Image (cartoon, rainbow, N blue to C red):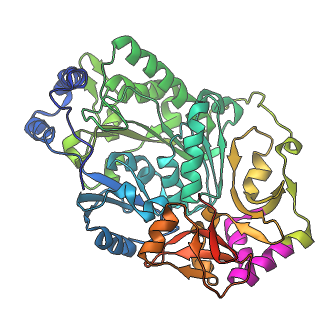
Amino acid sequence: MAKKKIRTPEKSDTPRQDAFEAAWEKFKPLVPEDELSAIEASFSRPLERAFRINPQKITAQDVETIACRYGWQTDPVVFCPEGYKIRAGEISPGQTVEHRTGQYYIQDSASMLPGVLFSSEIMAQRPLILDMAASPGGKTTHLCARSGDKGLILANDSSPSRIGALKNVLKKWGVLSHLVTAFPGENFGNWYPETFDLILLDAPCSMQSLVSIESHPLRPITEREEEALAQRQTALLDSALKALKPGGQVVYSTCTLSVQEDEAVVNQMIKRYGNLIQVENANKLIPHPAPGVTRAGDQIFDDSLAGTLRFWPHRYDTAGFYAALIWKKEAFGTSNTELPNRAWEKSGFSELGRSSRQDILDWFADQFHCELETCLTESEAVLWQRGNEVWALPERYLSTFSDIPCKSAGMRLATAASGGGWIPDDDWVARFFPVFTNQLFRLDDGQTAAWLRGEDLRLESGYPKGSILLMIDDFGVFLGCGRVGGEKIRNFNK
């Protein structure tokens, strides 16, 4: 398996090499002297690919099977129980059936850090979570995994062009308890003061990570651009703290090592709110310390900033990264301003009547021996209809956020089929696959390859026309729904 990520740019890539050298010259004085040789040695080592599993779909034991299937040699990400690095392998992790069906998410291991820092105790209490700058959605899926897809995640991104990617990632992961919005994050503190239990602000940044990777290539950064970013980051973090409940936590993170965008931003919040907030010592949550800085040139920061996390590339063999865990001790007394509003009636949804709801529950039970009611009850979701589609919407979304304009919420369950019955949504089946125990159709290797190409398959006999089959490969991985039509199984994913 080719390693596509590299720590430093090739010599022939002059712009990126210049950006690296400029960043290293700026950051080198901040690195403890006894770590200089280690960080310089790290620049020549390839950055290993990493992935984080979806606990709603697979377990740690399944990773061993997947690794064997693709010839991977894996190591755990030491600070993230769900994370794994791939040291070597025959198949790229982006080319597997398991990746296609949302069983894991490919992610630089440094980006797994923010989701790890939140309190497990709060995560277990069905929290209300705000992911303020969520796209493309990797960290949102981590929040879903840690909360067990319980409670509710409001995944927001201020860039409308990035919403499509966010929705697709959440759909493939199988996140039910969520809604997606597209507003400037600076608004949430005044719109929803003292509202959220947990808030992630993975802030837009200059991406000066000392590592050139596909998603975050190194490029020259001017002081003016860095200052503008720091101003926005400060406004976003201020908004996050205002929107947080007393007793709640904010994780502020960036994929840059710029002090102006990291410790200096958090330090401004300490000056602004004093004893109303507390920067937690997050170094206690990782295997070995990676302390933030308290002095940079003539800047002196609050001593608590040593408790934030500064991942120089050598410390955990990652791209450069920064994270701070902040606890809100007392209310700020922020008053709320008027929200944007969209009447629920304009959403196009109508609640299913009792008879229609029971018909769907009975159909799923008859066809797939699936107790759909159990899935809905455990997820605290209710069924609504829009056109010929049936959706499962989180109860908490309906009670708290139904009037705010959003781009999506919940999960589509099924679409009405011509001639009667339903076509289950592939992502719904993948999310709750263990409860589907009937109509499983196992494919051999050749059929699997053809199905993944979007081809229909021949069917000799055994199923009535119109039957819905759940296609699985030889390893039992769900590949999608097919519908029997004559002597073939129709592939909906052409």
Q: Main secondary structure of the magenta part?
A: helix
Residue drawn at x 71%, y 78% is: 467
Is residue 142 left or right of 16 when viewed as pictured?
right
Classify residue 461 by image quadrant: bottom right
Q: Quadrant of the N terminus?
A: bottom left
**Residue with the most extreme top position:** 224
Q: Viewer-proximal residue, 65 or 303?
A: 65
Seen in the picture, residue 221 relative to 81 is either above or below; the reply is above
Magenta stretch: includes residue 404: no
Classify residue 440 by image quadrant: bottom right
Is residue 414 left or right of 14 when viewed as pictured?
right
Q: Viewer-proximal residue, 303 or 456?
A: 456
Q: Quadrant of the C terminus?
A: bottom right
Residue drawn at x 53%, y 41% is: 134
* Whole-percent x, y for residue 327 in the image: 49, 43
Residue drawn at x 80%, y 41% is: 403
Residue drawn at x 58%, y 32% is: 161
Q: Which residues are magenta?
A: 358-382
Seen in the picture, residue 334 relative to 286 is either above or below; the reply is above
Magenta stretch: includes residue 365: yes
